[in-house]
Image: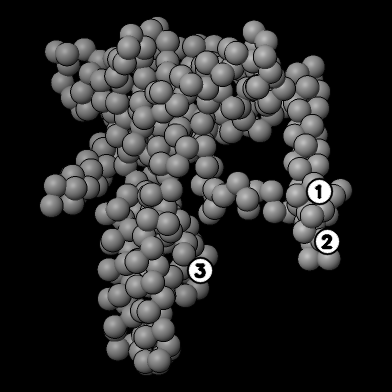
Amino acid sequence: MSLCNDVTTKAEYDKSNDLLKIFLYEDETIKVIGTKCRNAVLNLQEELRSDEAKYAGYVRHSVKNAMGAMTTSAVEGHNRVLKHGPMKVNAQHHLHNVMTRIMKTIRWQLSKSRNHATRQLSRTNTASNAPTKQYLINEGQALMDRNFDMRCHVKSAQVSPNRWIAWLPFKCKHKEDCAAHHEYLRLPQFLQVHEIELNTIDGKNFIHCKCEKRRSTGIPCTGLFRIVDNGRLSIKDIMTAGMVDVSWMKLFHSHFGKDDEIGKSLLLAQQQCFLYENHGTCVSAKVATNIRGRFDATYPIRGPNTSDDDLMQALYVRSKNDARSSS
């Protein structure tokens, strides 16, 4: 299941399954776990592959604001509060009372959330120095700060005036286990190189990264912050409230659905988020101008903390991905 979650492309998903099958058919593997156990694992693998659309991580990356959740069911989200909240619902309650208790629980939950959001409006987030801290809820600002700080570790290169590639340097996820047990070296781990593109849609500038983290979390990814920071802009230009999904705004949680000017503005903002969800993060004209490359320049151009070896490795991975996509 971890292989299903960690992959970001279908090519990585297929490669992981192929490597697992090769490993399971090796004589040493059969000698250790036995034929019966091997066959059971193969059956499980085939069952998971038959439900690829449900389990594969690269599919769930496109689910809007899912935050990488294993389930996006609204029922599952309310399961705990329905069973253990102030109006508990269980098998001991008569059916004619259950719906009333469920409705009261939902109203209590909505009222609790709105009261919490209203209190946040008057609070100052002292855990952040970002220019957006007065507009975003604490959780959203924490994600913004994390991704912004992580930009320092991201390698990048500009491959055309409006296109870049960005990637985190390869780091073994099982370093201690690999050192102690060589079997862990057989677990596939991928250098994930993501393409980033600057586009103009309806007069607005959007930066789209193929990692799709902006779509699944509503927060700009580390690669985007790396590219924007390459433009040598101030923090007020790099990090703005317009870059995030409207659901992370303090006003959204306290005023959405109200029949007033703020409520109607939030509804319009949400419609805009859905309208442009496939295009990435909206940035200002100043940002677009500063990061856009010259058409007469020689590409690729390495970004900060990116060596020639780093770039060659990323271009090699990218060429392999392009070959798999075209085949």
What residue lies at 30% left-to-right and 69% top-to-bottom?
19
Q: Which residue is mark 1?
A: 101
What residue lies at 51% left-to-right and 31% top-to-bottom?
218
Q: Residues within 10 Å of mark 2 (few under 14, many from 20)?
A: few
Q: Is residue 192 shown to the viewer in this render? A: yes
Q: Earlier in the sequence, mark 3 or mark 2?
A: 2
Q: Secondary structure under badge 1?
A: helix
Image quarter of residue 300: top left
Residue lying furthest right: 86
Disc 3 marks a residue whose amino acid type is Asp
Q: Closer to the camera: disc 3 or disc 2? A: 2
Q: Secondary structure under badge 2?
A: loop
Residue 93, numbered circle: 2
Disc 1 marks a residue whose amino acid type is Arg
Q: Is residue 312 shown to the viewer in this render? A: no
Q: Earlier in the sequence, mark 3 or mark 1?
A: 1
Which of the pair 233/214 is nearer the observer?
214
Verify CB contact (< 8 Å) between mark 1 and mark 2.
yes
Is residue 140 left or right of 311 when viewed as pictured? right
Separation (CA) of disc 3 from disc 1: 49 Å
- Residue 259: x percent and y percent? 67, 14
Against 321, residue 246 (above or below) is above
Q: Earlier in the sequence, mark 1 or mark 2?
A: 2
Separation (CA) of disc 1 from disc 2: 10 Å
What residue lies at 78% left-to-right and 66% top-to-bottom?
91
Image quarter of residue 313: top left
Disc 2 marks a residue whose amino acid type is His
Q: Which residue is mark 3?
A: 177
